[in-house]
Image (cartoon, helix red, strand yellow):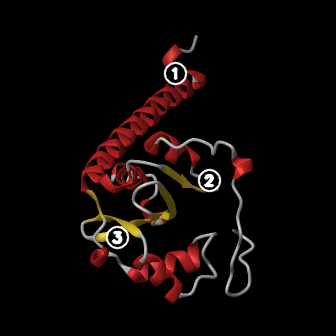
Amino acid sequence: MIPLFARADFRMFVKAYVFGCFKSLKQKIFTLIEKQRMKSLDSEIMVSTDKTKLDMNFIQRFLKEESHWATNRSPETIKRSIENSLCFGAYIQEKQVGFARVVTDYSTFSWVCDFFTDPKYRGKGVGKHLIKAVVNHESLKTGLMILATRDAHGLYSRYGGFSSLENVERFMQRKLYPSTPNPNF
């Protein structure tokens, strides 16, 4: 009779069990480390409305090359839109990692636009901090605030309190393009 511990199937079971436990433990440790890293990164995120801190090259590059809504904007148009809006920059250790622009009259209406996070920093709390800063800004606390999104509904509803537009049939648009229309708009 072959002892139980010598059987091949028993050894395979033990290896699978130990490896499975190790893999599960490794995943748990990784998750804890990642959560701790996220917490520490969370405390490093700073949001500012100081336009002198904005990295214009970062903003223009993202809007021209990575956004799906502003690829046809010229650098001059981007610069002018920033000059005439309330802008928010998100920073980690002085490096800009996010941006939001708000077109507003400061009393009855605000439109959040050009909202983005550097792809390398997505999922790390930057967007959450940015939208919270926007909706909590002292000058934007009254009136209607709107935005349009293709894929970030959860972020805006959870951290900004946004919901689907009511009475959407009342809203109209008129597109004015200085050149070829953007098919991604």
Which residue matches tag 1? 6
Is disc 2 placed on a helix, strand or loop?
Answer: loop
Q: Earlier in the sequence, mark 1 or mark 2?
A: 1
Front residue of this view, candidates 67 and 105: 105
Residue 151 got which mark?
2
Mark 3 to mark 1: distance in Å?
A: 61 Å
> Residue at position x 70%, y 87% from top?
179
Q: Amino acid at mark 1?
A: Ala
Q: Earlier in the sequence, mark 3 or mark 1?
A: 1
Residue contact at pointers 2 and 3, CB within 8 angstroms: no
Residue 96 got which mark?
3
Front residue of this view, candidates 31 and 80: 80
Q: Amino acid at mark 2?
A: Asp
Q: Which of the 4 image quarters holds residue 182?
A: bottom right
> Residue at position x 53%, y 84% from top?
77
Label 1 neighbour load within 10 Å: few <14, some 14-19, many 20+: few
Q: Which of the 4 image quarters holds residue 1?
A: top right
Residue contact at pointers 1 and 2, CB within 8 angstroms: no
Q: Earlier in the sequence, mark 2 or mark 3?
A: 3
Residue 146 versus residue 94 in the image, above or below: above
> Residue at position x 64%, y 42% from top?
166
Residue 85 percent location from the top left of the image: 42, 71
Front residue of this view, candidates 71 and 142: 142
- Left or right? Give the position of 145 relative to 121: right
Is disc 1 placed on a helix, strand or loop?
Answer: helix
Label 3 neighbour load within 10 Å: few <14, some 14-19, many 20+: many
Q: Amino acid at mark 3?
A: Gln
- Left or right? Give the position of 85 relative to 180: left
- Left or right? Give the position of 111 relative to 85: right
Residue 62 percent location from the top left of the image: 51, 75
> Residue at position x 44%, y 29% from top?
21
Is disc 3 placed on a helix, strand or loop?
Answer: strand
